[in-house]
């Protein structure tokens, strides 16, 4: 491990990378122009090309500091004569059907048939076989320090923003490009769009961030002030590149409080002004809040948000969603008068769990105006959520360091059809006699008429092989969504207002809503034995449907309340708790849940 000083108030830790590219099927590093003929397939069972296309392999893109990135450019044959707009998917995952992750690595390819994609697509990105016939070029770039691109591997931040800026401007200057460039893709490919667009590249015409982080520290690696780099350790173990990588796991272990290093990994969303088509889903422990932050806080006058009831990798390759994205791109890349601007600004989906979900309900804003916040008080004596304050004080406790102690639950039974939508907040009064800190995890569950806790299946059963049984669905967040959740380390309980240049506090509160809690994470406030403290915990945006007789339950526990993102991750998660946690309710300690509901 090495240390680099200069940019930030703390040195940045770097560690070695595997230097050999992973899962490659063509040679890396040698520039070559190929014509892929109509009918070409990468291998048996793959989608054949519907027309001839140009594949310029290992094109070198120069950056302002002299580093060169490798890219593969796919474009129509006609683009030598008639320039076309370009879509730039940006990530370190491998540029053309290569890399650390591929759909074939996941059960049933998450419901995407093998013949739906060509294998030319970058992971989580648009498929050239789909988009070249639609009149676009695809420029698959290996980000700085990945595979054979030069430099060291960086995780988000200003560096990726500047590199993306330089790449967009290079693309716009190519003779085959009509000077118009867009960005698209899931996850990393979405998150980096925030950083790149915030740099304001002149030739970026529009963007399609389909699920991305909006604050790396607060939403992922130290959510709620609790260090959690298990996912990133696994992801980085798959990475490869010529030099070293930024070691974000080591950084959060050494620098667990907010500083300018973590500030650099929070995109300046308010600097973004280009047209935007964003998506969000509930089926991730990574992106749900970031998608909402990005949509709400960007300054784009022309922006749209679509909520999906499925999973992001499943969603991006559905034909109706591809057609929808093309309408957006055609509007801004080709200037077509196609009516896209009449698309509802928000298309809301809410999960039914044991009933059909609400899909694509139009709304003018998020959350929709017909939802209103309600307060439910926790009663430790009856283990219920109630609309009136309990008259008597009571308490309940759980064994916080035990993975088998499922904590406390408080429920409210609806007497009419009800929908939950938006960010929720729990205010909890808690104490411990056993340690100077507490890591508290919460989740809202849906209970059926019999009080059974439910989960939502993110990949539709009709897209899985015939005969697949419910019990075969993997117990992972990709497949099974539990409910809106939040977490907080008690020593990080300080609350402040987020200040954003150009956005007043009044406008900010309207955009983020009254349930959004912002913790500065700049200092620790250790607990005294038995000290009762107030914890304000935001739960990520939710969308849930309840029928009359079904219940909403708030669970409070000492360990992660949702499933791991993928297999093998659960055993890498660390529980920092010691002993028992106690929750206090009643007239003096008004523990409560604040949720946005639409009744009837």
Image: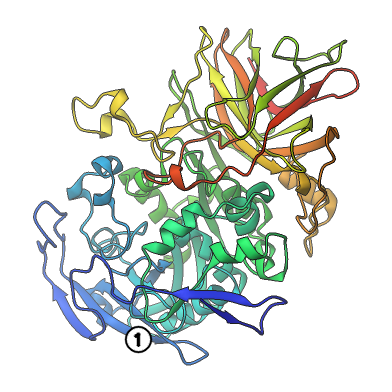
Asked if residue 165 is positioned above or below residue 370 in the image, the reply reads below
Expressed as whole percent of the image width and height from the top left, the position of residue 470 reads: 31, 24
Residue 156 found in image quarter: bottom right
Quarter of the C terminus within the rendering = top right
Expressed as whole percent of the image width and height from the top left, the position of residue 590 reads: 84, 24
Expressed as whole percent of the image width and height from the top left, the position of residue 129 reads: 23, 61
Query: 1 left or right of 105?
Result: right
Expressed as whole percent of the image width and height from the top left, the position of residue 56 reads: 24, 80
Asked if residue 399 is positioned above or below residue 81 in the image, the reply reads above
Between 252 and 565, which is closer to the camera in this rendering? Answer: 252
Residue for point 67% across, 67% down = 271
Residue for point 28% across, 28% down = 472
Query: 68 left or right of 23?
Result: right
Query: 544 left or right of 582?
Result: left
In the image, farthest residue toward the bottom: 66
Residue 203 visible somewhere in the drawing: no
Q: Which residue is mark 1?
A: 60
Between 123 and 418, which is closer to the camera in this rendering? Answer: 123
Residue for point 27% across, 77% down = 79
Asked if residue 305 is positioned above or below residue 249 in the image, the reply reads above
User: Badge 1, how many Cα within 10 Å: few under 14, some, many 20+?
Assistant: some
Judging from the image, what secondary structure is the residue with disc 1 in?
strand
Between 261 and 117, which is closer to the camera in this rendering? Answer: 261
Residue 23 found in image quarter: bottom left
In the image, farthest residue toward the right: 588
């Amino acid at each position: 491990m090495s240390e680099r000083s200069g940019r930030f108030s703390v040195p940045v830790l770097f560690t070695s990378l595997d230097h050999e590219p992973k899962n490659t099927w063509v040679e890396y590093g040698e520039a070559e122009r190929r014509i892929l003929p109509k009918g070409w397939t990468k291998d048996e069972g793959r989608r054949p090309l519907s027309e001839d296309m140009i594949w310029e392999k290992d094109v070198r893109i120069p950056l302002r500091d002299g580093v060169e990135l490798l890219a593969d450019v796919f474009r129509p044959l006609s683009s030598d004569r008639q320039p076309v707009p370009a879509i730039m998917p940006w990530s370190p995952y491998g540029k053309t059907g290569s890399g650390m992750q591929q759909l074939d690595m996941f059960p049933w390819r998450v419901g995407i048939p093998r013949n739906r994609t060509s294998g030319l697509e970058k992971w989580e990105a648009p498929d050239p076989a789909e988009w070249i016939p639609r009149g676009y070029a695809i420029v698959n770039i290996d980000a700085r320090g990945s595979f054979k691109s030069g430099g060291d591997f960086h995780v988000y931040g200003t560096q990726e923003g500047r590199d993306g800026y330089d790449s967009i401007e290079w693309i716009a200057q190519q003779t085959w490009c009509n000077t118009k460039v867009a960005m698209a893709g899931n996850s990393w490919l979405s998150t980096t769009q925030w950083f790149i667009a915030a740099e304001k590249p002149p030739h970026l015409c529009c963007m399609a961030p389909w699920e991305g982080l909006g604050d790396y520290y607060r939403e992922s690696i130290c959510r709620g002030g609790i260090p959690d780099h298990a996912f990133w350790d696994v992801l980085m173990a798959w990475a490869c590149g010529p030099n070293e990588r930024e070691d974000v796991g080591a950084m959060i272990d050494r620098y667990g409080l907010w500083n300018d290093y973590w500030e650099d990994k929070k995109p300046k969303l308010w600097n973004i002004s280009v047209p935007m088509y964003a998506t969000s889903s509930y089926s991730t422990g990574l992106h749900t809040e970031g998608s909402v932050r990005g949509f709400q806080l960007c300054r784009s006058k022309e922006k749209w948000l679509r909520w999906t009831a499925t999973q992001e990798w499943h969603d991006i390759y559905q034909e109706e969603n591809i057609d929808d994205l093309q309408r957006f791109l055609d509007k801004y890349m080709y200037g077509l008068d196609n009516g896209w601007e009449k698309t509802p600004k928000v298309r809301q989906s809410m999960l039914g769990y044991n009933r059909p979900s609400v899909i694509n309900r139009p709304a003018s804003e998020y959350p929709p105006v017909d939802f209103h916040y309600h307060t439910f008080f926790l009663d430790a004596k009856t283990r219920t959520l109630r609309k009136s304050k309990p008259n008597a004080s009571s308490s309940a406790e759980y064994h916080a360091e035990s993975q088998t102690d499922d904590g406390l639950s408080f429920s409210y039974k609806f007497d009419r059809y009800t929908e939950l939508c938006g960010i929720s907040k729990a205010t909890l009064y808690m104490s411990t006699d056993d340690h100077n800190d507490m890591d508290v995890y919460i989740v809202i569950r849906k209970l059926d008429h019999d009080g059974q806790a439910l989960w939502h299946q993110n990949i539709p059963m009709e897209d899985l092989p015939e005969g697949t049984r419910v019990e075969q669905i993997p117990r992972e967040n990709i497949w099974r969504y539990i409910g809106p959740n939040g977490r907080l380390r008690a020593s990080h309980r300080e609350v402040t207002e987020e200040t954003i240049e150009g956005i007043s506090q009044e406008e900010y509160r309207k955009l983020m809503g009254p349930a959004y809690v912002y913790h500065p994470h700049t200092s620790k406030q250790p607990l005294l034995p038995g000290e009762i403290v107030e914890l304000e915990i935001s739960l990520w945006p939710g969308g849930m449907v309840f029928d009359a007789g079904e219940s909403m339950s708030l669970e409070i526990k000492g360990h992660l309340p949702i499933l791991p993102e993928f297999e093998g991750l659960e055993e890498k998660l660390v529980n920092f708790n010691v002993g028992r946690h106690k929750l206090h309710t009643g007239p003096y300690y008004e523990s409560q849940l604040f949720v946005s509901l639409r009744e009837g």
